[in-house]
Image (spheres, helix red, strand yellow):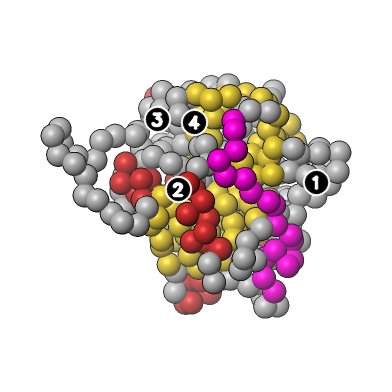
Amino acid sequence: MPETAPSRTRTLRRRATGLAVAGTVLVLAVPAQATALAGQAPAASADPVSVLKYTAKERKDALAYWTPARMTAVGKSVDLGPTGPKAKPWRGPTLKTVGRLFFVNANGADTWCTATAVKSANRSAVMTAAHCVRRGSSPYNTNTAMVFVPAYHKGRTPYGAFAVRRAATPRAWERDSRNDMAALTVDTDKNGKKLTDVVGGTPLAFNRPVGGTVSALGYSATRPQRGEELLRCTGTAKKENGQQAISCDMTGGSSGGPWLADFDAATGKGGVLVSVNSALDSLTPTKMFGEVWKGTAKKVYDRAQGR
């Protein structure tokens, strides 16, 4: 879909647009819709989690594919307009657990989102948005060559790159674009070290009441950053249409970025991950939406942190 104003907006939970970026194309989340005709029930599944797996060769190829030059080039190919007044460049201490998630989407385009390394039993789990893994309501349109680069900044990769070997999403996302969150399991780095042994892990919270001040971060494709710098919005989380929302104007590329509660901006510490960037309220955004993480989100995370 060309990067034009008439084509960039599609409804999702009252005009919300997806946030993943692919070359010169803004990838939009598919509108939530029924999975069966009237009077028919959707096929039941005992497992509420869907898992993609990547072979050893696919992971090796992904690391070779995402050179520093390619990482920089994908940002230069996208311009989603000027950065809004609510999204500020992060100038605090390096947030080692937050990074850029590079991949090739189902259309074959180079793409990125934002993701976060989290505390986990296997020390290898990363949280992001489901639409950064696969297209909603479309089981076979999945992303490939997925690589997580923590603390990415202006072409620099201070902690290396970690290939994704598994990607878990809610089955509801695969079937009808509901519950836009995902958990990834990554390989060790080139030195054989596990992710959170290298950068640490952000703690998570499930079934947390919505409210309080939240910092949302992401590698937005707006200029002048164009995905090369981390941006931050701060707002009070409120329930809205079954999700939670904060005031924020980050756009494409910030998908999957962390929502941190109890975050100390002065030290860059103390944050608890309570959701991730999922969707916007309009083409000219004023709100960012994130899912309220409940039981299914915990099951998705557990699948990623399993050994």
Q: Residue at x 59, y 33 (%)?
A: 209
Which residue is denoted by mark 1 in the rendering? 269
Mark 3 nearby-residue class (10 Å; few <14, some 14–19, many ≥20): many
Percent across and percent down for residue 210 are 59, 30
Determine the CA span between mark 1 and mark 2.
27 Å
Q: Is residue 70 visible?
A: no
Mark 2 nearby-residue class (10 Å; few <14, some 14–19, many ≥20): some
Which badge, 3 or 1, comes first in the chain's sequence?
3
Magenta-colored span: 193-210
Q: Residue furthest right?
A: 266
In the image, residue 284 above or below residue 117: above
Percent across and percent down for residue 158 are 76, 61
Which badge, 2 or 3, comes first in the chain's sequence?
3
Mark 4 nearby-residue class (10 Å; few <14, some 14–19, many ≥20): some
Q: Is residue 160 left or right of residue 16?
A: right
Percent across and percent down for residue 109 are 44, 52
Task: Tell me the chief SS of the magenta region.
Answer: loop
Q: Amino acid at mark 3?
A: Leu
Residue 202 lies in the magenta stretch: yes
Report the disc number at residue 243: 4
Determine the CA span between mark 4 and mark 2.
14 Å
Q: Residue at x 51, y 51 (%)?
A: 298
As rendered, which of 96 and 273 lies closer to the eye? 273
Which badge, 1 or 2, comes first in the chain's sequence?
1
Which badge, 4 or 2, comes first in the chain's sequence?
4
Mark 1 nearby-residue class (10 Å; few <14, some 14–19, many ≥20): some
Q: Which label sits in the foreground, 3 or 4?
A: 4
Report the disc number at residue 12: 3
Determine the CA span between mark 3 and mark 1.
33 Å
Q: Are marks 1 and 2 in contact (CB under 8 Å)?
A: no
Determine the CA span between mark 3 and mark 4.
12 Å
